[in-house]
Amino acid sequence: MTFQIRHLSAADYPLVISAIDHWWGSRPMADKLPRLFFEHFADTSFAAERDGRLAGFLAGFISQSRPGEAYIHFVGVDPAQRGGGLGRLLYEAFFRAAQARGCTLVRAVTAPVNRASVAFHERMGFQLEPGDAEVDGIPVSSGYDGPGSDRVCFLRILRGP
Ligand SMILES: CC(C)(COP(=O)(O)OP(=O)(O)OC[C@H]1O[C@@H](n2cnc3c(N)ncnc32)[C@H](O)[C@@H]1OP(=O)(O)O)[C@@H](O)C(=O)NCCC(=O)NCCS
């Protein structure tokens, strides 16, 4: 059984919000994914289903301020569905949507504690941007998202078809 990828919609919001704290290993994440992503960024956000059940999602958008840039805010895969290529499928769907809108560059950030996310982004072809500090050899931007909220910043060039 394969995954069905479709655009995210406002109808997905309650289900995604109820799942993500668990999907992020009990970190409180729900308030970092407001409903506006489901309402206003549906064209560049995706849900994946398997057997009619939500298996993963991606929330991303095209930058209004930086022409040619796109940004992935959140990606999550049900722990029971990990390791089977779904994260890659969701990223590839986003890359296509961003390229179709003229983007040549994708950015994302993650918390330094999230080593799985760092490894995943490296496998997806992202470079780690230089930071002002290092944690276990990983460049970190201190206070990027406010005091105490350091981030690892990623960058990926989108090549032509
Ligand atoms: C990160 C996440 C989305 C990956 O989803 P996934 O479906 O398991 O990823 P895939 O199976 O598509 O893996 C894609 C590549 O990343 C690699 N990868 C994925 N998770 C990895 C991990 N924990 N450690 C090392 N490599 C990993 C895979 O080996 C694969 O590499 P390959 O295609 O070159 O063989 C998933 O683990 C998740 O939802 N984590 C919790 C939420 C989160 O942290 N999101 C990211 C920050 S917003």
Image: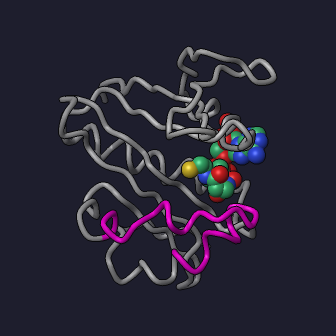
Number of numbered discs present? 0
Q: Quadrant of the N terminus?
A: bottom right
Residue at point 51%, 75% (across, down): 16
Q: Is residue 126 magenta?
A: no
Coordinates of residue 155 in the picture (x, y in percent): 46, 26
| Image side of residue 161 versus residue 109, left or right | left
**Quadrant hosting residue 116:** top right
Residue at point 36%, 69% (across, down): 8
The answer to whether one can see residue 85 in this image is: no
Coordinates of residue 89 in the picture (x, y in percent): 51, 52
Q: Is residue 33 magenta?
A: yes
| Image side of residue 98 versus residue 115, left or right | left
Q: Which is more toward the observer, 11 or 27?
A: 27
Q: Which is more toward the observer, 111 or 56?
A: 111
Q: Quadrant of the C terminus?
A: top left
| Vertical arrangement, residue 154 with respect to residue 139, above or below | below
Return the residue found at the far right. 136
| Vertical arrangement, residue 79 with respect to residue 104, above or below | below
Magenta segment, which residues? 17-38
Residue at point 61%, 76% (across, down): 19
**Quadrant hosting residue 122:** top right
Coordinates of residue 132 in the picture (x, y in percent): 59, 15
| Vertical arrangement, residue 22 with respect to residue 146, above or below | below
The answer to whether one can see residue 144 in this image is: yes
| Image side of residue 64 versus residue 91, left or right | left
| Image side of residue 22 versus residue 144, left or right | right
Coordinates of residue 33 in the picture (x, y in percent): 45, 63
Residue at point 59%, 40% (across, down): 149
| Colour pattern of the rendering | one colour
